[in-house]
Amino acid sequence: MNEPFTLEITYQNKPLEFPAAFQRLGYTYRIVVPINDVSYVFEPDKEVQYRVLAAPADVQPDVGLLWAIAEKLQRLGNL
Protein backbone atom coordinates (compact mmCIF):
# COMPACT_ATOMS: atom_id res chain seq x y z
CA MET A 1 0.00 0.00 0.00
CA ASN A 2 2.90 2.36 -0.73
CA GLU A 3 0.84 4.31 -3.22
CA PRO A 4 1.78 7.84 -4.24
CA PHE A 5 -0.83 10.57 -4.01
CA THR A 6 -1.05 14.34 -4.36
CA LEU A 7 -1.33 16.36 -1.17
CA GLU A 8 -3.19 19.63 -1.72
CA ILE A 9 -2.90 22.39 0.87
CA THR A 10 -3.38 26.14 1.10
CA TYR A 11 -0.43 27.95 2.63
CA GLN A 12 -0.13 31.73 2.88
CA ASN A 13 -3.30 32.01 0.79
CA LYS A 14 -1.74 30.02 -2.06
CA PRO A 15 -2.91 26.60 -3.22
CA LEU A 16 0.00 24.16 -3.28
CA GLU A 17 0.34 20.55 -4.39
CA PHE A 18 3.01 18.12 -3.28
CA PRO A 19 3.62 14.54 -4.32
CA ALA A 20 3.43 12.26 -1.31
CA ALA A 21 3.82 8.55 -0.61
CA PHE A 22 2.26 6.39 2.09
CA GLN A 23 4.78 3.90 3.55
CA ARG A 24 3.60 1.09 5.80
CA LEU A 25 6.11 0.13 8.53
CA GLY A 26 4.96 -2.88 10.51
CA TYR A 27 2.03 -1.71 12.64
CA THR A 28 2.49 1.96 11.81
CA TYR A 29 3.13 4.11 8.76
CA ARG A 30 4.86 7.21 7.49
CA ILE A 31 4.06 9.70 4.78
CA VAL A 32 6.95 11.07 2.74
CA VAL A 33 6.51 14.51 1.19
CA PRO A 34 9.26 15.92 -1.04
CA ILE A 35 9.60 19.70 -0.85
CA ASN A 36 12.26 21.48 -2.91
CA ASP A 37 14.24 18.25 -3.45
CA VAL A 38 14.22 17.36 0.27
CA SER A 39 12.07 14.46 1.47
CA TYR A 40 10.31 15.13 4.75
CA VAL A 41 8.93 12.17 6.66
CA PHE A 42 5.73 12.66 8.64
CA GLU A 43 4.55 10.09 11.14
CA PRO A 44 1.63 9.97 13.56
CA ASP A 45 2.13 9.82 17.31
CA LYS A 46 -0.15 7.93 19.71
CA GLU A 47 -2.83 10.64 19.51
CA VAL A 48 -2.56 10.61 15.67
CA GLN A 49 -0.96 14.05 15.67
CA TYR A 50 1.56 14.21 12.84
CA ARG A 51 5.16 15.19 13.40
CA VAL A 52 7.94 15.60 10.92
CA LEU A 53 11.20 13.80 11.49
CA ALA A 54 14.36 15.91 11.54
CA ALA A 55 15.39 17.68 8.36
CA PRO A 56 18.97 17.38 7.07
CA ALA A 57 21.35 19.65 8.99
CA ASP A 58 22.14 21.80 5.96
CA VAL A 59 18.46 22.54 5.19
CA GLN A 60 16.47 25.41 6.69
CA PRO A 61 12.85 24.19 6.39
CA ASP A 62 9.82 26.45 6.26
CA VAL A 63 8.36 25.47 9.63
CA GLY A 64 4.99 27.04 8.85
CA LEU A 65 4.71 24.96 5.69
CA LEU A 66 5.58 21.79 7.59
CA TRP A 67 2.88 22.64 10.18
CA ALA A 68 0.35 23.21 7.40
CA ILE A 69 1.17 19.82 5.89
CA ALA A 70 0.94 18.08 9.27
CA GLU A 71 -2.45 19.70 9.93
CA LYS A 72 -3.73 18.60 6.51
CA LEU A 73 -2.57 15.02 7.16
CA GLN A 74 -4.35 15.18 10.53
CA ARG A 75 -7.61 16.23 8.86
CA LEU A 76 -7.27 13.50 6.23
CA GLY A 77 -6.76 10.93 8.97
CA ASN A 78 -9.99 12.02 10.65
CA LEU A 79 -12.19 11.45 7.60
Image (cartoon, helix red, strand yellow):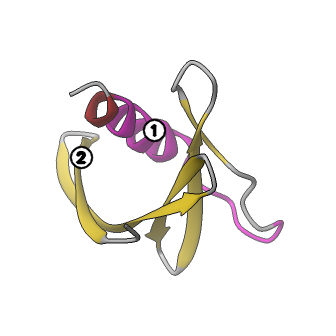
Crowdedness near tag 1: few (<14), some (14–19) or many (≥20) residues, C-alpha within 10 Å: some
Distance from Cα at disc 2 to Cα at disc 1: 10 Å
State the residue at coordinates (32%, 71%): 3
State the residue at coordinates (83%, 66%): 57
Q: Secondary structure at mark 1?
A: helix
Given residues 66 and 75, the one toward you in this image is 75
State the residue at coordinates (27%, 36%): 76
Give above or below for 64 relative to 17: above
Q: Which residue is mark 2?
A: 9
At which x and y percent is residue 75? Answer: 29, 28
On screen, residue 31 versus residue 26, left or right, reads left
At which x and y percent is residue 31? Answer: 48, 57
State the residue at coordinates (52%, 60%): 24
Given residues 12 and 2, the one toward you in this image is 2
Q: Which residue is mark 1?
A: 70
Going by the picture, which residue comes out furthest to the right? 57
For residue 16, what is the image quadrant? bottom left
> Does the segment drawn in magenta span residue 27?
no
Dot 2 or dot 1, earlier in sequence: 2
Amino acid on which the number 1 mark rests in the picture = Ala
